[in-house]
Image (cartoon, grey):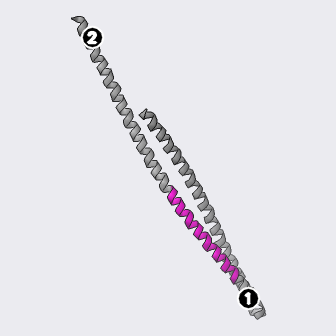
Amino acid sequence: VKIEAGRTDKGKALAEQQGLILQLKEAISQLTTKRDQLLEIVCTHDDVQWQQEEAFRSRLTQAGDDHEGRYQKIVLDRDAKSERLRALESELAACQVEAAVLKTKASEAAVSFDGLQAAEAELERKEHDFKKACKKNEDDLQIVHVRIAAR
């Protein structure tokens, strides 16, 4: 009965560990997606910002103050993109924390699983020793019966 209970606990721990591993993989996938989004926004933002600022600076020098409004719009757009970038960085940090927590849980489940395996091995060793002792007792009992019959 104890062996079956140990095996059931081992199966539960294994299932829990596999669930944690799936959660960890999902968190890693989300982190990768967020990182890719951040990189795309940063690259696009920097390129667009530089090109737009250069173009409008040139026009401002040529056309005068009537282009000031457009330049201010670019600055506002850049600020909005910077704000979005900060928000994504914050989300990324939260995902990284969640991934670390899931990784810790997976490690704990692995340690628990290893402990269950060690306990099962010890139980199997004791069962083997018990069967060996029973066999020796049966052999000793047969010797006693043979001696009694011989008298």
Mark number, residue 145:
2
Q: Main secondary structure of the magenta part?
A: helix
Identify the mark nearer the N-term, 2 or 1.
1
Q: Position of residue 130 (x, y in %)?
A: 33, 28
Q: In the rendered image of this protein, does residue 126 appear above or below residue 104?
A: above
Q: In the rendered image of this protein, does residue 33 appear above or below residue 17?
A: below
Residue 140, by quadrant, is top left
Q: Position of residue 2 (x, y in %)?
A: 42, 34
Q: In the rendered image of this protein, does residue 121 appear above or below residue 28?
A: above
Kindly identify which residue carries mark 1.
58
Instruction: Report if residue 53 lies within the magenta region.
Output: no
The amino acid type found where label 1 is placed reads Ser
Q: In the rendered image of this protein, does residue 14 appear above or below residue 145?
A: below
Q: Farthest residue toward the left?
A: 151
Q: Which span is picked out in magenta?
A: 75-102
Residue 29, by quadrant, is bottom right
Q: Nearer the viewer, residue 15 or 41?
A: 15
Q: Position of residue 20 (x, y in %)?
A: 53, 51
Q: Nearer the viewer, residue 74 or 46?
A: 74
The amino acid type found where label 2 is placed reads His
